[in-house]
Image: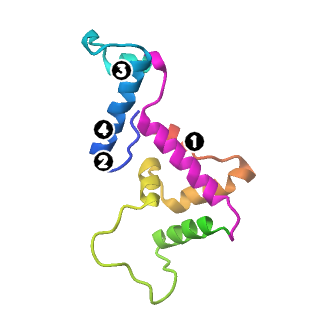
């Protein structure tokens, strides 16, 4: 299972992080480069998830934490305004986007990780304390 951090094909940063993660696992197992052991075998031996899965899980955890903060906390307000913006609700009537290419936002990363709209993820995260719903079932469905 591969969790995507960025675009549909793995980015250079993602590949570099995964290579570093594998190098660290090889060092932990004291495997030398001339032993020619495949990465799949090393991952199965260590039992560690890929670095992309780890990052995605932590990103989802932080999203849920910020969504469940009190309404007057600045981080909650900022995330709420991003969610409203993704639903087409600008902060006021005079607001408009800056010209040029849209920036890659953290909320966009969350959307790519889970293949769900941020508003749906927001509802799941906020209701987590009430019904026990988490983002984990979303990750397991992929």
Which residue does the image show at 47% across and 59% down from the upper left? 107
Label 3, on which residue? 40
| Helix, strand or loop under label 1 | helix
Foreground residue among 90 and 43: 43
Label 2, on which residue? 8
Tag in front: 4 or 1: 4
Is the stretch drawn in magenta largely helix, strand or loop?
helix
Tag in front: 4 or 2: 4
Q: Using a 10 Å C-alpha cutoff, classify the residue at mark 4 as few (fewer than 14 neighbours), some (14 to 19) or many (20 or more).
A: few
Q: Which badge, 4 or 1, comes first in the chain's sequence?
A: 4
Most extreme residue toward the bottom is 94
Q: Which badge, 1 or 3, comes first in the chain's sequence?
A: 3
Q: Using a 10 Å C-alpha cutoff, classify the residue at mark 2 as few (fewer than 14 neighbours), some (14 to 19) or many (20 or more).
A: few
| Helix, strand or loop under label 2 | loop
Label 4, on which residue? 15
Distance from disc 4 to disc 1, alpha carbons, whole Å, reads: 24 Å
> Number of labelled discs?
4
Q: Which residues are magenta?
A: 45-72
- Return the x and y of residue 76 as percentages of the image width and height: 61, 65
Tag in front: 3 or 4: 4
């Amino acid at each position: 299972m591969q969790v995507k951090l960025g675009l549909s094909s793995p980015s250079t940063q993602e590949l570099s992080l995964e290579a570093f993660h594998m190098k660290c696992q090889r060092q932990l197992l004291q495997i030398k480069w001339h032993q020619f052991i495949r990465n799949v075998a090393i991952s199965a031996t260590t039992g560690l998830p890929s670095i992309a899965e780890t990052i995605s899980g932590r990103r989802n955890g932080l999203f849920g934490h910020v969504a469940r903060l009190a309404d007057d906390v600045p981080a909650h307000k900022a995330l709420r305004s991003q969610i409203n913006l993704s639903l087409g609700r600008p902060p006021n009537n005079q607001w408009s986007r800056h010209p040029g290419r849209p920036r890659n936002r953290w909320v966009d990363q969350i959307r790519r990780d889970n293949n769900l709209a941020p508003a749906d993820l927001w509802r799941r995260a906020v209701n987590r304390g009430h019904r026990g719903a988490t983002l984990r079932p979303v990750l397991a469905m992929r």
